[in-house]
Amino acid sequence: MRSSFPCCLKLAAVLITFMILTAMIYPLNTTTSRVLLPSSNPQFNASKLALLVETRPLPILAPLLLHFISVVPPDWPFLFMGSHVSIKAINKSFAIRQRVVEGKLTLAPVPANMSVQSQEMVSRFFTNLWLYEKVLHPAEWLLVFQTDSIICANSKHNLNEYLEYDWVGAPWNPNSAWGGNGGLSLRRVSRIIDVFRNHQRPNNAEPEDVWLTERLAHHPEARLANGTVSLTFSGELHSSPPEKCDKMTSNGTIEDTKNVRGIDGWREGFYEPMGYHTGGGGVWLHAPIWGTPELRQHIWSYCPEVKMTLDMDVAKYMPGNCRSRWKR
């Protein structure tokens, strides 16, 4: 009678292989703080990187990351840096795990000797040479985004339009030649490394975005986006000239415009940046962009996904009769 022992060995080998593959794709140990990926993936451009740093296990993390992945040009890889708790939380999402397996997203821990628990600690993190030389290498262009920022799916603009600049962010002064908020910003890594070769940010100095852009502005080779360009990238404090629509000509074409009357009329008269950054975790909403029901209603139509970054119904924060104007 033939022994079934070899067959048992084959079956055991198949089961072990299946278990190993399952563990790789759907890890049971969600406390793993770093997922190692191949160093090169032909789908993605190693000179580009989008970065979210968040140590709190916020419910918005997975939806926000997946949204950014869907609207940023497809050759951009993503890096999420967090605590063991926030990485464990985000790793519960099946969609997130799929992006990790595909090589689109890397999960990595914030080092134990560093913190992002306060504005000052965030500034120290983003002005540390180690981040730009070691963690981000070989990226040349860095998109930094936070949980109070969004890029709008309806935007006519595309992140790659801004790669000629060393820094772009929502302008603090729309008439300025440089500067912009770092909470949603595009940065050139090599230029920032140049700054660190000659400057070191003192503790408790200006916020990292102010400190860096002031020094980039004096770099002889730097090219920073001015206020006009920055307003097309991100809206925060200031509005911009509204969208306009032109009539089609007799041959069915349009001239010098991206909007067509009769098709894009809903855009006319409103400011539409590529994205928004609010500040304070979605609490700080500034009047030029958010201050009337009409402005907010257009944003809900143009960029409904921004709602997941907002922390409250702003009406309850308005004193007296202002409440009625701030209702959604």
Image (spheres, rainbow, N blue to C red):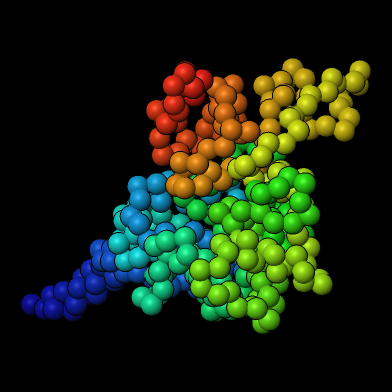
From the viewer's perspective, is residue 321 above or below residue 2? Answer: above
Nearer to the camera, 151 or 119: 119
Q: Quadrant of residue 111?
A: bottom left
Residue 232 shown left or right of residue 303 in the figure? right
Who's the residue at 31% across and 69% down the image?
32
Q: Position of residue 161 (x, y in %)?
A: 74, 52
Q: Quadrant of residue 16?
A: bottom left
In the figure, residue 291 lies in which quadrant?
A: top right
Residue at 35% from the left image edge and 50% from the top image edge:
58
**In the drawing, does residue 211 fall left or right of residue 265?**
left
**Which residue is outermost to the right?**
250
Q: Position of residue 14 (x, y in %)?
A: 26, 70
Q: What residue lies at 62% left-to-right and 70% top-to-bottom?
A: 139
Q: Is residue 11 above or below residue 90?
A: below
Q: Nearer the viewer, residue 2 or 260?
A: 260
Question: Does any portion of residue 181 appear in the rendered image?
Answer: yes
Does residue 229 appear anywhere in the picture? Answer: no
Give the quarter of the figure containing the N terminus.
bottom left
Vertical order, 286 against 17 (above or below): above
* 101 on left or right of 132: left
**Extreme residue in the bottom direction:** 197
What residue sits 75% from the left and 60% below the top? 224
**How many numbered discs, if any?**
0
Image coordinates for residue 168, horizontal then vertical, percent: 69, 55
| Towards the viewer: 218 or 138 | 218
Left or right: 245 as drawn, with respect to 198 = right
Between residues 63 and 35, which one lies in front from this camera angle?
63
Q: Residue furthest left?
A: 1
Residue 306 coordinates in the image, percent (x, y): 51, 38
